Image: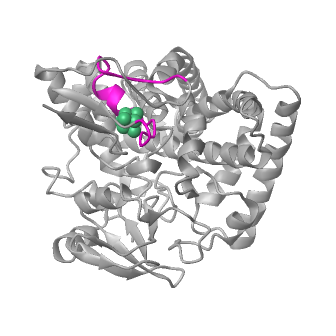
Amino acid sequence: MERRCPYAPPAEYDRIRAENPVTQVELPTGKRAWVLTRHEDVRAMLADPRFSSDRANPRFPTLVDNTPMRAAFKPSLISMDPPEHGPARRAVVGEFTVRRMEALRPRIQEIVDQAIDDLLAAGEPADLVTHLSLPVPSLVICELLGVPYADHEFFQLHSGRLLSRDTSPEDRRHSVDQLTSYLDKLIVEKEAAPTDDLLGRQILKQREEDNVDHEALVSLAFLLLIAGHETTANMISLGVVALIEHPEQLALLREDPGVTLSAVEELLRYFTIAEVATTRLAVEDVEIGGVRIKAGEGVIGLSNAANHDPAVYERPDELDIARGARNHVAFGFGAHQCLGQNLARMELQIVFDTLFRRVPSLRIAKPVDELDYKRNATVYGLHSLPVTWS
Amino acid sequence: MRVITDVDRCVGAGQCVLTEPSVFDQREEDGTVLLLTDEVRGETAERVREATHLCPAQALSTSD
Ligand code: SF4
């Protein structure tokens, strides 16, 4: 379903939520799945262990044919169920605690400042995606994982292809192979000489626990790289557009940098760029929102519809940066809630604060409805964003 | 009000720490929740209730 305008979720969502909040749809793959549109139902489903995340299950209601991914991988965190999921997540989540992220703040600030220097040096009009949205999360995740930044273009290319719904199964397979063999080699090098970064520390940890698993590390690195590249980049671009388009909101943010925290939450809610990451498979019969979902049936918790549920958010389609609601499901909910959420929050805060402080005259160089939106991608966003200043 | 945590359920999302850092922290090794105090009152208790609601893993609860 297409977005009604670059911002709002498709109008069908409101209609479905009002008329038939738990309903069945046919997916592009021909499979049928339930769609949940109420905030309450989506949260209940995501927190319920009777719904599985096992994307390798042939009955899993995927939107694209994911066979190449399945063939190439050991299940990564996002595909695991208990009892495997808990320990695997705990092995890495210590790297993403609120305190750890705080410690990264000065380095992220440097990265953002450098990117803005580059943007300004590029001259008007410059593409914000190339100079800011992509390099910031890319540099941060490469540094965190210990992946040489020199290779970031390679990652951006392949992760973009993987997340586009227009990519053919052969191209998808090719991108998976390229990324996997690169990471495989990188981890072999780190195993020979563990470095002081996330991957290096994971290697040492595995040895300590006598639980060495090369494949698991490759798939973890794969997951974090993909997740770390595209999502934050898209939120940066969309957030900049939304703030410039709502000058009264931007003025609020400028007056009081303390508002940025809540502005970031509101932008996350408002756009909900990964709206179907919350897809699951029922492994037992479960009743949700008064409807009986049977074992073996797929369910899509439509997080974008949930985040615009008028039962929870007043005037849900309005951007209100003072709202600061943290109960949105833009990062999912339940055991799989986004591992990198606090990193993403911090990157977004620093970017918005710094960008509008340093470049107060920032404008978009094109009418907003003519921008190049990712209309057919798993993660919504912008391919490019021409901006001017002065 | 007493704060109760179920570390086995915790998935280390840190929502609790963001909401009330004077009550919650995360373990360095595995990111799981760590209580700095288990008796709270007033506004802090309010925020602990909010954290209970936000916790994605239903690992937090309270009792009077
Ligand atoms: S919010 Fe819940 S899951 Fe996250 S760290 Fe706190 S207790 Fe654990």
Give yes or no for residue B19 being in the magenta stretch: yes
Query: Looking at the image, which is closer to me, A245 or A53?
Result: A53
Q: Main secondary structure of the magenta part?
A: loop
* Residue B21 against residue A56 in the figure, above or below: above
Q: Position of residue A166 (x, y in %)?
A: 60, 69
Query: Would residue A204 be found to the left or right of residue A307 on screen?
Result: right
* Residue A45 against residue A136 in the figure, above or below: below
The quarter of the picture where residue A80 lies is: bottom right
Residue B23 shows up from this direction: yes
* Residue B60 against residue A155 in the figure, above or below: above
| On-image quarter of the C terminus of chain A | top left
Q: Position of residue A108 (x, y in %)?
A: 54, 22
Query: Looking at the image, which is closer to me, A70 or A209?
Result: A209
Residue at the spot x=66%, y=45% of the render?
A220
Query: Looking at the image, which is closer to me, A173 or B7?
Result: B7
Query: Looking at the image, which is closer to me, A34 or A276?
Result: A34
Residue at the spot x=33%, y=17% of the render?
B36
The quarter of the picture where residue A236 lies is: top left
Q: Position of residue A111 (x, y in %)?
A: 58, 22
Start and end of the magenta stretch?
A: B7-28
The quarter of the picture where residue A104 lies is: top right
Quadrant hosting ligand 1? top left
Query: Would residue A79 be found to the left or right of residue A348 on screen?
Result: right
Residue A2 shows up from this direction: no
Q: Position of residue A162 (x, y in %)?
A: 64, 59
| On-image quarter of the N terminus of chain A | bottom left
Residue at the spot x=71%, y=57% of the render?
A74
* Residue A298 against residue A220 in the figure, above or below: below
Q: How many marks?
A: 0
Give yes or no for residue B47 being in the magenta stretch: no
Q: How is the image coloured?
A: one colour
